[in-house]
Image: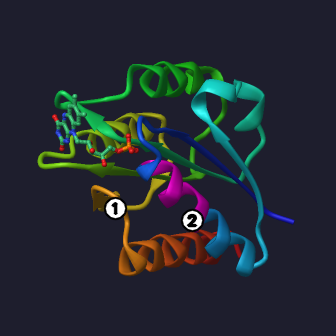
Amino acid sequence: MARLAIIYGTGFGNTGLMAQAIEEGAKSAGVEVIIKNVKESGIADVEGADAIAIGSATYKGEAMPEVIEFVKGMAGLSLKGKVGTAFGSYGWSGEASKVITGMLKGYGMDVMEPPLRIKRRPADAGLEECRQLGIQIAGKLK
Ligand SMILES: Cc1cc2nc3c(=O)[nH]c(=O)nc-3n(C[C@H](O)[C@H](O)[C@H](O)COP(=O)(O)O)c2cc1C
């Protein structure tokens, strides 16, 4: 079974809700999912995954530092051609998922664009967008 790793950073849970809905969508399309808050994750969680989704909320115009550190730590993995995507909740500028998209592209990943950004707490429509993203990721792994 194809495997998706979802690693996310969240201050107030909004990006976490996005992550859970992406998980739901991917699972409904038959993909095995590992989902972890970046604080509880290690590089082993993404090693060997067929697709990697990285989430971060935006704070002070930037992605969360622990998420950036995690993505930097992926540099040693063989990621070329693997499916990657970034996502995150934001308030007004939403830089985080754009920065992460650039980093994943730098690793030669097959990055889905534009990244999925949702303003503040995702409502039903936003959660549905996240589920659809999970389904799209699954589609790319078939
Ligand atoms: C101190 C602080 C700084 C923030 N800075 C930004 C920012 O620069 N750009 C932006 O788009 N949103 C900013 N936000 C809004 C958050 O990104 C938004 O509340 C988001 O939903 C938080 O997601 P989370 O619950 O996953 O942490 C900021 C919020 C706080 C509390």
Give yes or no for contact between labels 1 and 2 (Cβ–Cβ under 8 Å): no
Q: Residue furthest right?
A: 1
Secondary structure, mark 2, is: helix
Residue that mark 2 sits on: 22
Residue 42 appears left or right of 114: right
Which comes sooner in the sequence, label 1 or label 2? 2
What mark, if any, has residue 38 been given in the picture? Answer: none
Residue 18 appears left or right of 44: left
Residue 137 appears left or right of 26: left
What mark, if any, has residue 113 been given in the picture? Answer: 1
Residue 132, how many percent across, how many down?
50, 79
| Predominant SS along the magenta part | helix
User: Three-letter amino acid code at disc 1?
Assistant: Glu
14 to 57, vertically: above or below? below
Q: Residue furthest left?
A: 92
What residue appears at the point 35 percent right and 59 percent down from the top-left corner? 121
Q: Which residues are magenta?
A: 15-21
Does the segment drawn in magenta span residue 27? no
Residue 30, how many percent across, how many down?
78, 76
- Quadrant in the rendering for residue 29: bottom right
What residue appears at the point 53 percent right and 41 percent down from the top-left corner? 8
User: Three-letter amino acid code at disc 2?
Assistant: Ile
Location of ligand 1 given as a quarter of the image: top left
Residue 122, how many percent across, how many down?
37, 65
What residue appears at the point 46 percent right and 73 percent down from the top-left corner? 127
What residue appears at the point 61 percent right and 25 percent down from the top-left corner? 39
Q: Name the image quarter holding the N terminus.
A: bottom right
